[in-house]
Amino acid sequence: MRSFTVDTNIVLIGMPGVGKSTVGVLVAKALTRDFLDTDVYLQAEEGRLLHEIIAAEGREGFCAIEEHYLLSIDCTACIIATGGSAVYSEKAMEHLRAGGIVVFLDMSFDELARRVEDLGGRGVVMAPGQTFLDLYSMRTPLYRRYADITVSLDGLDHTEAVAEIERALQDAGIPLSGRKSV
């Protein structure tokens, strides 16, 4: 069994639109931890938006670039919101899991479909002709595979989502307080 300390990273995975970035910032604030959005990190380092990288490099090229940046992450006591496609890289997920606990933010397809409109503009890695339902069906088993904890966010507002994530982390024995000040 793995043990966790106050320095353990909390890695959020899940579908586009589930709220990894939005809720992640709020969890980081509530737990007084640093926050890293891997999509923002990747875009800043590349100097291009996600959809531009996908258009220029293709799906496989984008995933290789994403894996490179995920493997470069070296932080402690962070809330890390990953891109939805992070689970395509076993090496990257094992790297993130080595320093953290992986939390799958789960949501029903119907609720996600109501939240997500412009997949292309978001920079979602999809095969030609693949629907959002196809993507959901393909990725959900991967999220479950890598998750240490699964938290359902169906029907929750942001405040309730943060409380539910905190409860799940406490139930898993993750120390939420006691971090030294900077």
Image (cartoon, grey):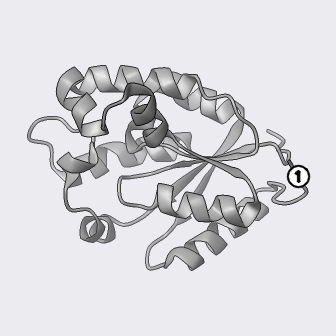
Name the side, left or right, on which 66 lies relative to 32: left
Quadrant of the rendered image containing residue 47: top left
Q: Quadrant of residue 8?
A: top right
Query: Which kind of residue does numbered mark 1 sit on?
Result: Ser
Residue 75 screen position, x and y as percent? 70, 34
Q: Residues within 10 Å of mark 1 (few under 14, many from 20)?
A: few
Q: Quadrant of the N terminus?
A: top right
182 relative position to 68: left or right: right
Q: Which residue is mark 1?
A: 181
> Does residue 49 appear left or right of residue 78 in this picture?
left
Q: Residue 150 at what x, y percent from top left?
A: 57, 57
Which SS class for mark 1? loop
Residue 162's spot in the image, x, y percent?
Answer: 61, 70
Can the viewer see residue 144 in this picture? yes
The quarter holding residue 169 reads bottom right
Q: Residue drawn 18% across and 30% down?
A: 55
Residue at the (43%, 42%) spot, across then down: 83
- Residue 69 position (above or below residue 7): above
Residue 26's spot in the image, x, y percent? 60, 65
- Answer yes or no: is residue 125 visible: no
What residue appears at the point 71 percent right and 67 percent down from the top-left corner? Answer: 30
Instruction: Identify the residue at image location x=40%, y=31%.
Output: 88
Q: How many marks?
A: 1
Height in image: 65 above or below 124? above
